Image (spheres, rainbow, N blue to C red):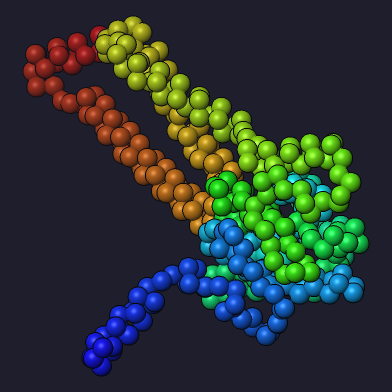
Amino acid sequence: MAPSAMATAFICSTFLALLIPPAVSLTCSGQKFTKNQVFSTCLDLPSLSSYLHFSYDSSNTTLSVAFVAAPSKPGGWVAWAINPKATGMAGSQALVAYKNSTSSLAVVRTFDISSYSSIVPKDLSFEIWDKTAESRSDGSLVIFAKIKIPADLASGGKIIQVWQIGPGVGADGMLAKHEFAAANLQSKGTLDLKNGHASGSFRGDTTIKNKNVTPSELLAEELVLSSAANPPRITYSGHRNIGIALFVLATVQIFALFLRPKKDHKYRFYWNIYHHSFGYAILVLGILNVFKGFNILRPDHKWKSAYMIVIIALGAISLALEAVTWAVVLKRRSGKFKKPYDGYNNGQGRQDEFF
């Protein structure tokens, strides 16, 4: 190959390499940490573009880990957990990292996930120390910790690990729910502490269990797997009921236009009261339901603030227009009474207006 052709090929290959997103080209072997921590093993986990670095000391059953992952959205959270009881997230002891809303520094919290409906900050059931977190320039977060593996888990040389990423953290520290895509549901597997490798998502694999597994334990495991593949449905009754009410009111408003009496009809006055009452009810309920939606989805605070600013601005404009309308009406009414007489006919006309 001619030198010029080689140079062209090199430039093209370099350019293409730069186009590859960091999340695609990155592997655990190329990851470095700010404090130059070194681990004996690193693994590219099979889902959610996540990575685990660990060292295991079998003499005292101590596991040192560094878990690396990027939240699903900026301001979100990442989690790595050990489940001593089952093969899913329910029952796991989790370490969760996210950026503090006030200082923007990465923090790590412990969560005892006793069930899918109960995710609360709580001390873990086994000893843990040196837990810290750091944020990286590529948007990912790292969880560092040293964990004392209980004797019953350490005896088999394998543990169940679960990892996850989420979109946000509320002001009260509660985690916004993660997605239920295939990658999220498959983010679990076994971690072989002695041989330094991991398996993928569970599909009924019970090899890491103790040999004397009872039928009831197997049934419990199957139930956990079923609930992970079909996560519990969450119903927001208030938000749903207001939405139904809005749909009904809006529909009635539309059909009411076809039943509107003429201006001189005796029922027009009552129709106006009903029509305006329904209109204002729709406005109030619509605004209220949007706020309920914010509480459910827990987006960044800036979106809620922007919505409040828009609503206040529209309210101020509406009040101003209403004031102008009333000013015009009152002016027209006062003009009728102040119109001078210009003879018998005008005088008679003014007289007829009053009677």
Residue 305, position in %: x, y?
50, 54
Residue at x 9% of width, y 14% of height: 344
Residue 297, position in %: x, y?
56, 46
Q: Quadrant of the N terminus?
A: bottom left
Residue 301, position in %: x, y?
54, 56
Above or below residue 182? Residue 143 is: below
Q: Is residue 56 visible?
A: yes
Residue at x 34% of width, y 79% of height: 13
Residue 350, position in %: x, y?
18, 16
Q: Quadrant of residue 96?
A: bottom right
Q: Quadrant of the C terminus?
A: top left
* 157 horizontally vs 49: left or right: right
Residue at x 62% of width, y 63% of height: 45
Q: Is residue 96 visible?
A: no
Q: Quadrant of residue 122?
A: bottom right
Residue at x 46% of width, y 49% of height: 307
